[in-house]
């Protein structure tokens, strides 16, 4: 074969392996994202005849809507609660299952990951049952200590019902981040800990001086990941457990997007909420990265 | 070496915490099974943690399977999961191989485009995807769901597999080309079998994601015949407000949990290595 033919064969091969995937990616990922930005500029009920250009009108309307602000607040409440809850518990378990030399560490690790393979829908239904006022677990348990039967409507408080969504969210997230932390800890050279042992440093000192600084990168990734998956996906647990209620108090951005678009047919407004989610997750990523870079300088 | 925890009290407390968390994970699974064997009366009269009365109501399972058409939803979920996984593997492995081994104009930019797309919240694309599918007449079809789920695995698949192909020695391909194999033959007969561990990891993670997915399933499908399992579970739960059939609801939960649990038990290690690879972005 001449070099020209070889080159042509090579190019045909490259094109045939790159182009189909790229076309697919353009149609089902890039195009929808661009369309979302475009739709957010229209007042649109879903039928093509009635699409009115309103510029940034949806965004003005959005910022005057108290439910949007509440949804943003709830999303960040969940982000903060999950970051604190998951990071503390997952890091503790990761350290316990690697550095503390417990027997059956592998067994515990396998068990702890199970909630992560179960659908959030199932988790939501199970926790609904825990919270169920008549036949639920929590009231049944509390009734053991009281004379009359407890019948608290755990998901129906006029305020703060969003707190009730935090335990299932944390419970469901521990295993995944624990696995990440375990991998990071196992990458730390054993000689560091051996040296610390010889010098008589206790577990707590070793944790603070060796483990945390050396898995800090992984912790940062985890925190960013919790933030992004929450802003993006908190919708499911909310939708299954409260549908945003009572009286929109547990609405998050995702659930409000769904409700405005697919229940009330304000597709332009819904798309604008989507753009808001994108903007907030990018801004929060930048802000968190700044904050945590500062932190890592202090530690080292 | 005096590693581990020395203080016995602390050790006991830590063990207790580990056991407590294990119980909090395992108990709901056991409890789902036990409650699937109760009738309504037992839910209202007995404590939630009470064991089911004899005889066990195994018929709850056949009841949801047939009367609630879980046989149909199960097959729907299976078709969508397998279809999107195979298509996703094919599309991501081909591109990942070329990106890992061949330099061409824009190859780095393309790689960055795929990787950075993982940063975009997919919920942004929800509304446009609905209208896109609508215009392609793919609403209420399994094909529509397969295409959307395939697109959701591409970036992650390419990211992990590029790393995987790069870690394989180049000599094998050179030898294959020397032997007169075409580029395609080299890829399909030499490289693809070698990258099996990477492919399986992507496949497992995709299977878990798609099997459990709810949002796209509920938006792109509104014809009950085409529902996937998570969507039907949500519908069933909403219906419980008017019609209380707790036993069958728990039987339904059990039906959707068991397959992923089996996949997890068989492929544990791959899942752990997969999420570790994916998170080091």
Image (spheres, rainbow, N blue to C red):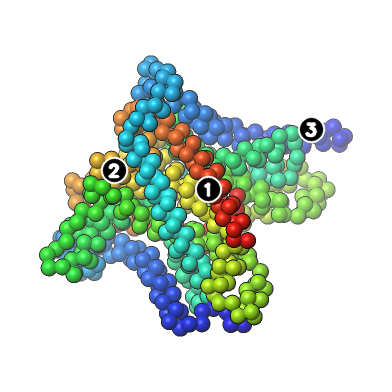
On screen, residue B69 versus residue B197, left or right, reads left
Q: Check disc 2 and report the residue beneath it.
A: A249
Give the mark toward the camera: 2 or 3.
2
Q: Which mark is residue A276?
A: none
What is the x, y in percent for residue A293? 59, 52
Q: Secondary structure at mark 3?
A: helix
Task: Check the residue under mark 2 and report the chain it is in.
Answer: A
Q: Secondary structure at mark 1?
A: helix
**Neighbours of disc 2 within 10 Å: few (<14), some (14-19), many (20+):** many
Q: Check disc 3 and report the residue beneath it.
A: A8
Give the mark toward the camera: 1 or 2.
1
On screen, residue A183 versus residue B22, left or right, reads right
What is the x, y in percent for residue B237? 27, 48
What is the x, y in percent for residue A125? 31, 53
- Which residue occupies the extreme top position in the image? A49
**A42 w.r.t. B192: above or below:** above
User: Between residues A216 and B255, which one lies in front from this camera angle?
Assistant: A216
**Going 57% across and 35% down the picture, which residue do you hit?**
A25
In 3D space, how far apart are the residues under numbered discs 1 and 3 (Cα atoms)?
A: 48 Å
**Neighbours of disc 3 within 10 Å: few (<14), some (14-19), many (20+):** few
**Going 59% across and 32% down the picture, which residue do you hit?**
A23
**Going 35% across and 63% down the picture, which residue do you hit?**
B29
Q: Secondary structure at mark 2?
A: loop
Q: Check disc 1 and report the residue beneath it.
A: A288
**Going 68% across and 37% down the picture, which residue do you hit?**
B109
Asked if both marks, 2 and 3, belong to the same chain, the answer given is: yes
In 3D space, how far apart are the residues under numbered discs 2 and 3 (Cα atoms)?
A: 62 Å
Task: Check the residue under mark 1 and report the chain it is in.
Answer: A
């Amino acid at each position: 074969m001449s070099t020209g033919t070889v080159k042509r064969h090579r190019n045909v091969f490259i094109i045939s392996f790159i182009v189909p995937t790229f076309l697919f990616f353009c149609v089902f990922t890039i195009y929808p994202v661009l369309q979302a930005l475009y739709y957010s500029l229209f007042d649109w009920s879903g039928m093509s005849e009635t699409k009115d250009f309103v510029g940034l009108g949806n965004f003005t309307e959005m910022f005057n809507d108290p439910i949007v602000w509440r949804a943003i607040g709830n999303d960040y409440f969940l982000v903060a609660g999950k970051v604190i809850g998951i990071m503390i518990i997952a890091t503790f378990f990761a350290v316990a299952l690697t550095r503390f030399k417990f027997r059956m560490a592998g067994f515990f690790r396998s068990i702890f990951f199970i909630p992560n393979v179960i659908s959030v829908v199932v988790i939501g239904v199970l926790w609904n049952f825990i919270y169920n006022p008549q036949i639920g677990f929590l009231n049944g348990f509390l009734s053991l200590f009281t004379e009359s039967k407890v019948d608290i409507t755990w998901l129906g408080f006029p305020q703060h019902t969003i707190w009730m969504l935090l335990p299932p969210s944390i419970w469901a997230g521990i295993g995944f981040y624990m696995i990440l932390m375990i991998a990071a800890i196992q990458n730390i050279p054993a000689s560091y800990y051996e040296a610390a042992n010889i010098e008589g440093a206790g577990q707590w000192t070793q944790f603070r001086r060796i483990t945390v600084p050396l898995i800090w990168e992984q912790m940062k990734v985890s925190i960013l990941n919790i933030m992004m998956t929450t802003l993006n996906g908190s919708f499911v647990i909310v939708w299954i457990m409260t549908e945003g209620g009572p009286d929109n108090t547990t609405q998050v951005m995702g659930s409000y997007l769904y409700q405005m678009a697919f229940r009330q047919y304000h597709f332009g407004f819904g798309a604008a909420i989507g753009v808001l989610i994108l903007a907030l997750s990018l801004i929060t990523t930048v802000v968190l990265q700044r904050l945590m870079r500062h932190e890592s300088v202090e530690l080292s | 070496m005096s590693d581990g925890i020395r203080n016995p009290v602390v050790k006991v407390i830590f063990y207790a915490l580990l056991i407590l968390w294990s119980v909090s994970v395992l108990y709901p699974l056991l409890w789902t099974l036990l409650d699937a064997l109760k009738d309504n009366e037992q839910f209202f009269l007995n404590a939630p943690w009470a064991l089911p009365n004899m005889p066990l109501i195994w018929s709850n399972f056949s009841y949801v399977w047939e009367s609630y058409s879980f046989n149909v939803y199960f097959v729907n979920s299976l078709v969508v999961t397998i279809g999107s996984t195979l298509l996703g593997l094919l599309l991501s492995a081909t591109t990942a191989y070329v990106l890992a081994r061949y330099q061409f104009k824009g190859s780095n930019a393309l790689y960055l485009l795929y990787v950075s797309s993982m940063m975009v919240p997919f919920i942004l694309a929800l509304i446009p995807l609905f209208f896109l599918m609508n215009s392609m007449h793919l609403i209420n079809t399994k094909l529509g769901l397969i295409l959307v789920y395939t697109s959701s695995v591409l970036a992650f698949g390419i990211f992990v597999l590029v790393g995987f192909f790069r870690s394989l020695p180049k000599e094998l391909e050179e030898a294959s080309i020397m032997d007169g194999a075409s580029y395609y033959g080299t890829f399909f007969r030499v490289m693809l079998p070698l990258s099996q561990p990477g492919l399986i990891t992507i496949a497992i993670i995709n299977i878990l994601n798609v099997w459990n997915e709810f949002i796209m399933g509920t938006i792109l499908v509104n014809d009950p015949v085409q529902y996937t399992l998570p969507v039907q579970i949500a519908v069933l739960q909403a219906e419980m407000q008017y019609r209380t059939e707790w036993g069958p609801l728990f039987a339904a939960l059990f039906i959707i949990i068991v397959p992923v649990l089996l996949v997890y038990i068989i492929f544990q290690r791959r899942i752990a290595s997969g999420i570790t690879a994916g998170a080091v972005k």
